[in-house]
Amino acid sequence: MNQEQKNNPLHGVKLEQILEALVDNLGWKNLGYLIDIRCFNFDPSIKSSLHFLRRTPWARQKVEALYLERIIDFNKKEEE
């Protein structure tokens, strides 16, 4: 199982950590612009967003993809 996961950049990263990193780096307004879902645009909170994302696979996939694109790539560029 470890060999399957060693190439998965999200292995060991919790959804809450992903969401907090996106909010810290982008803010709710930009996050809502990039991923247009109600829980990001109207009275956003970590708790309500996690509730929605855990029950909505397509939205979670968009959040994870944005995290990989913005946060992980940004961190790699900083290390160089």
Image: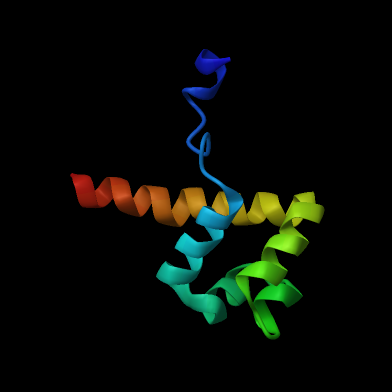
Seen at 67% across and 49% down, the residue is 61
- 38 relative to 62, above or below: below
Q: How many marks?
A: 0
Residue 4 sits in quarter: top right
Colour scheme = rainbow
Whole-percent x, y for residue 55 in the image: 81, 54
- 14 relative to 11, above or below: below
In which quadrant will I find the C terminus?
top left
Whole-percent x, y for residue 1 in the image: 58, 15
Whole-percent x, y for residue 76 in the image: 29, 45
Seen at 49% across and 48% down, the residue is 68
Task: Looking at the picture, tell me which residue is in the foreground, 46 or 33.
Answer: 46
- 59 relative to 72, above or below: below
Seen at 51% across and 43% down, the residue is 13
Question: What is the residue that sits farthest to the front in this orientation?
Answer: 47
Seen at 55% across and 77% down, the residue is 28
